[in-house]
Amino acid sequence: MPTDFLAAVLGHRTYLASVELILVIESVSIEMAELVDVRDDEGNFGKYKKYDGRYYVKHFVGNVKDHLAAIDSMDVRDDDTFILSYPKSGTHWAFTLASMLRTGETVYKGSPTFLDFTDKDTLDNLPSPRVFASHMTFDFMPKQVKEGKGKVIAIFRNPKDVLTSLHTFMKKLDVLKEDYKMTWKGLLNFHMEGTIFYGSWFEYIQSWDKVKIEHTGNNIMYLMYEDMVQDLGSHVHKLALFLGDTYGSDFVDKVTARCTFSNMAEEATRTFTPSEQWKTVTTTKTLPIYRKGVIGDWKNYFTVAQNEHFDKVYNDKIKSSTFKFRFV
């Protein structure tokens, strides 16, 4: 091999390696610049990533700017399903239902693949049917989803129970002990100000009201957590029709029986082999998802004054919403 040709090849490889290194350094630099530390005078704090005025969990993949661009450009398949929810609104419940209805197997799948925490190469290489989850709003879904491809299941829960569940959940995440510390009062205050990961629940609902008006596709189904608690069967049948109803009514009934909240919680305790993720991030070393699954547990946490203040903010910000929530 001529020495000048070899030198050219090696030089080109060195150049490519240098470019790749520069891109990695730039990505890391952007990620470091996105990190923020939000604190109050009472010792409550949260360490997040902040991009374009929005707060994201610190464990969001890479830098937010690049990962959002990667999600936007995803190649969506016709049988892809996206579970969208504000944290602690029934994400795993909807994921389990959708997974069973998509695969035709009444098998518990554990945790969903979150767009927020999974790199694009991994997302692209998952086998069909893919069921994703995200706590981001519809605005940040892949372009093809917003154009009507794939199916979106949006599940909502009343905000008082959401915050109650979020508070107890975050206390179990051992991995966050250096990045997050909130009393109940602190969580409420940060949430009201919107200085918390994924922003306030109010902002989340307002974004979906906008989607209802502007999105003309028929690839979104809206579920209410409280309705599912009171009448799971009819909603599972509606969900099956939305996803294609491939396996018949008897199978849907079996899915319904498997996916009552009590059965899922029992199954999680009895048979789930904790993933490496949960083993390292929680104080219990197990899947900390299922707690009570009831409506109205917020009454055990909100003081009278906190409840009155919350109701005032709720009425100011959500009074014109098309979504109606039940608190008991």
Image: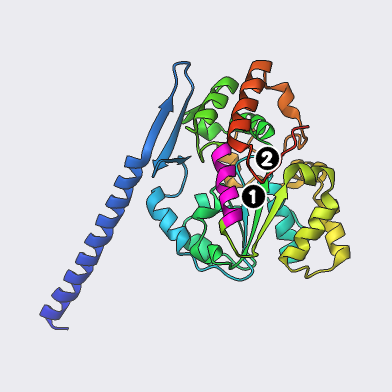
Residue 289: x, y in percent?
Answer: 68, 40
On residue 211, the disc is none
Instruction: Say if 299 sits above or below 2 in the image.
Output: above
In the picture provided, is 161 more to the left or to the right than 59? right
Query: Which amino acid, mark 2?
Result: Ile
Dot 2 falls on a residue whose secondary structure is: loop
- Residues under numbered marks 1 and 2 in contact, where contact means CB atoms less than 8 Å apart: yes
Residue 291: x, y in percent?
Answer: 73, 35
Residue 111: x, y in percent?
Answer: 64, 50
Q: Is residue 206 magenta?
A: yes
**Residue most extreme to the front:** 320
Q: Identify the main secondary structure in magenta.
A: helix
Q: Which residue is mark 1?
A: 111
Instruction: Specify the quadrant that holds the N terminus.
Output: bottom left
Q: Is any part of residue 206 visible from this angle? A: yes
Dot 1 falls on a residue whose secondary structure is: loop
Q: CA distance from mark 1 to mark 2?
A: 9 Å
**Residue most extreme to the right:** 250
Q: Residue at x 50, y 38 (%)?
A: 197
Residue 243: x, y in percent?
Answer: 72, 65
Q: Which residues are magenta?
A: 202-213
Q: Which residue is mark 2?
A: 289
Q: Residue at x 44, y 33 (%)?
A: 47
Residues 288 and 195: in front is: 195
